[in-house]
Amino acid sequence: MIGERDANRVRTAGDRGPRRPTRREFLGLAGLGALAVGGCGLLPGGESDPLPGIPRPGKTGHVEKYTFGAAPLDFDVAGQSFSTWGYNGDVPGPEVRVREGDTLRVRVENRLPEETTIHWHGLPVPDDMDGVPGLSQAPIRPGEDFVYEFVVPMSGTHMYHSHVGLQLDRGLYGPLIVEPKSEDLSYDREYTLILDDWLDGVSGRDPERALEDLRNAGGGMMAGGMGGMMGGGRIEYPLYLVNGRPPEDPKSLPVRRGERVRLRLMNPAAETIFRFAVDGHPLTVTHSDGLPVEPVEVDALTIGMGERYDVLLEANDPGVWQVAAAPEEKPGLARALLRYEEVGQSSPPPDHRPPNLAGRLLTYADLRAKGLDSFPGDGGPFTGPDRVHRLTLSGGMGAYEWRIDGQVYPGAEPLEVREGEWVRIELQNQSMMRHPMHLHGHSFQLLNGTGRGPFKDTALVQPHMGGLALDFHADNPGEWFFHCHNAYHMESGMARVISYET
Ligand code: C2O
Ligand code: CU
């Protein structure tokens, strides 16, 4: 791909000394990639003058229409039926698949007994289409309809879900796949794997009850031993699912020897971080949160709530192999099966844990942003952060309450930004749990020490004084949620509004 090759050449030219490329150089080559694709050629000497913004994809003019009925339903899991809430009678909801630049129009018919909304997780949509109740829209009342409509601004593996209360911990989620206009990735087939932790309707439990249990347990530190709870304020779920299927009734992923297979992994679970591996097959990570990264080979990866990864695997070892997602710090397993069509072998047992779950694990420091066909935002020249928000994450001691910089949402001050600024957020985690922090409306660049950290929208902050820093370009005016994607933490205060000054 032309833009890619030219970008590499410029990167070499611009990075002469031992120092890392600066942010400005990085963004310069971003601009250059876009120019080269547009046929405008190279800038002299590989130097990057401040460039105009990278445009979002132009409108294709094509309108892709869906109708989602949000309603109670009976969800069949391994011969048992649980009543839950979902879209169009199934869990997960229907796959939305569009091309970047298309217009997506989704009519939501709320037939739930409660208000609802849909959030397009990963897409920087216009503010009034973002689905945060009371912030970007009035919630859709029972019996009412609402139409979401926007030009799809970015390619990648994303998801959609309800953003009201704990509704995410029912079946109100689904995959949102945006195909790029072009992509230098070749593969023979692809599968989408949607990981979930499930309690709704099992032994009379539902998410509200689970939250009550957490609160009654007197906070995170004392929750051990309660039915369905464990120490540290985590919820131990009775079931873990891949694409709505339990380990006893796994989804099969048919492949042929010699094929290259793309897996789109997403974690819309409410309270569970998974470790993912495919027995017998290393994984090449190609995208994080929908955006391309330099390929990196690993045995396993950790995927927090709200995160997505795309990986490739080479199908070169016939058999029937466990595709495993192990809940971190909780017992149980979610699985699917990689099944070569040539062989008729028996399946591994439901609880088989592939040894490579304990192999080489992806870290954020392994990830580098790549190619810039899908560059998020308009990429104005980076001149150092214009504004820094330093925030602590805390909670879970004493009461089940979670805080950003000591404040509990909704009684929390907004974080101000101004349009056009580069904003840095530095997080320090004073609690004992990991928090997958998610930013609406923008992709951010993780500062991972490489100078070319990946662009993401959700990132896990490690516990016990773990830290994380990210930069984003304030290019999408509005009021945006920034929160922990643990649904129970969000519901217990771990959220802020990022507010554009006017
Ligand atoms: Cu997927 Cu505010 O969330
Ligand atoms: Cu959290």
Image: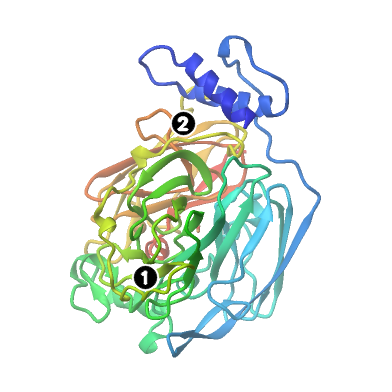
Q: Nearer the viewer, residue 271 or 137?
A: 271
Give the foreground label among 2 and 1: 1
The reply to whether discs 2 and 1 touch (Cβ–Cβ < 8 Å) is no
| Pointer 2 residue | 387
* Residue located at (61% from left, 46% from top): 478
The answer to whether residue 65 is left or right of residue 111 is: right
Give how far across and how far down residue 342 sits, in percent: 47, 67
**Amino acid beneath label 2:** Arg
Q: Residue furthest top?
A: 45
Identity of the residue drawn at 41% across and 66% down: 270
Q: CA distance from mark 2 to mark 1?
A: 42 Å
Q: Which residue is pictured at 27% across the width and 66% down the height? A: 353
Q: Quadrant of the N terminus?
A: top right
Question: The residue tagged with tag 2: helix, strand or loop?
Answer: strand
Q: Quadrant of ligand 2?
A: bottom left
Residue 334: mark: 1
* Secondary structure of residue under mark 1: strand
